[in-house]
Image (cartoon, rainbow, N blue to C red):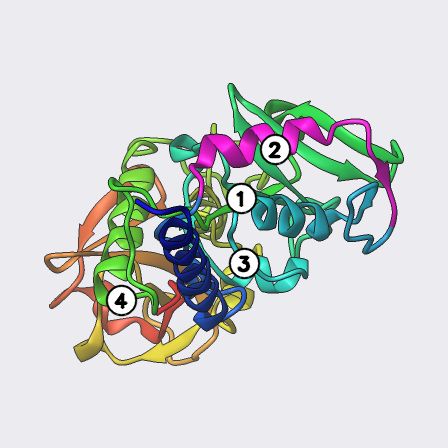
Amino acid sequence: MAKRDWMMKSTIGVLLSTSLLLGGQVGQAAAYSQDSATSETIAQTAKSLIGKDYQYRAEGPDSFGSAQLATYVYGQAGMRIANTMADLYRGGTAVGRDELQAGDLLFFSSSGSGQPTFMGIYVGDGQFVYSSQREDQVVLKPLSDYDGKFLGARRYVETASAAQTASGSNESVSSIADQIIRIGEKYLGTPYKFGSSKNTTQTFDCSSFTQRVFKEAGITLPRDSRQQSTVGKTVSKSQLKKGDLIFMRSYGSSSNRITHVAIYAGDGKILHTYGKPGVTYSTFFGTNWEKRVVTIKRVIPE
């Protein structure tokens, strides 16, 4: 091939790649890159920046804010993502802590709940890289040191085993719902305790259970059932889908004061915790559980 022809083809390839990247919606799943570097390359780039200075909202290459470190690293790998923590937390695909892969973005809150206050890039082996305000530099840390502050993870690198459509399709929603049920099932039989701490998995009350399960799936919920009922999209019983949250009143009460929350698990079952069974499955339709419904919310992004 003549050098001129080779250069022309290379130039066209670059222009096509740039066009595809710029055509994506920043901060959403549409920003996935089909032809960019692998997640391992992203992780290696992140580690190469350890020791660089922290500076609020700095975009590199010599200093970085928390979100801007991720934006820069992905940019070096040819992927265009948002440059604010809020947008990055809303975008991508939620993944559970037990499904993390190198390149996933991790989000934390100093208080352990609410909106993220800092974030990092998972690099494998239980470690992540982030730009630390307290340490005034980019650092490498064990994820286990931040158990009480971890809010969730988002994946922006599309893989053969975890490919998702650009708009968050029904397939994606179903996958997250299945993940939520799997997470909940691992706690079957865990004792019920009213007012159980959100920081323990040895006991649960109804809302600490839903908060924990959704948190492990990368979705942050408020602590109690009445607060949880204020988030997400309201749906009817006829619209119920796996992963929806069902909020209920007390047994025999005519008031709409919410006292219980359960996860719809599909096939007419709910996954929740109460009394002596602890975390358990219950039949929903045609039972007192159904009669107690106040509202149903869908919090899995559609």
Question: Would you call the spot at circle 1 few (<14 residues within 10 Å), some (14-19), or many (20 or more)?
Answer: some
Q: Could you tell me if the residues under marks 4 and 3 are in contact, i.e. CB atoms within 8 Å?
A: no
Amino acid type of disc 4?
Ser
Q: Earlier in the sequence, mark 3 or mark 2?
A: 2
Magenta-tinted stretch? 37-55
**Where in the figure is residue 279, as x and y percent of width and height?**
32, 39
Label drawn at residue 45: 2
Q: CA distance from mark 1 to mark 3?
A: 9 Å
Q: Earlier in the sequence, mark 2 or mark 4?
A: 2
Amino acid type of disc 3?
Arg
Q: CA distance from mark 2 to mark 4?
A: 31 Å
Tag 2's secondary structure? Answer: helix
Amino acid type of disc 2?
Thr
Q: Which residue is mark 1?
A: 77
Q: CA distance from mark 3 to mark 2?
A: 15 Å
Q: Earlier in the sequence, mark 4 or mark 3?
A: 3
Q: Which residue is mark 3?
A: 80
Q: Could you tell me if the residues under marks 2 and 4 are in contact, i.e. CB atoms within 8 Å?
A: no
Against 82, residue 294 (above or below) is below
Question: Would you call the spot at circle 3 few (<14 residues within 10 Å), some (14-19), or many (20 or more)?
Answer: many
Whether residue 234 is in magenta: the answer is: no
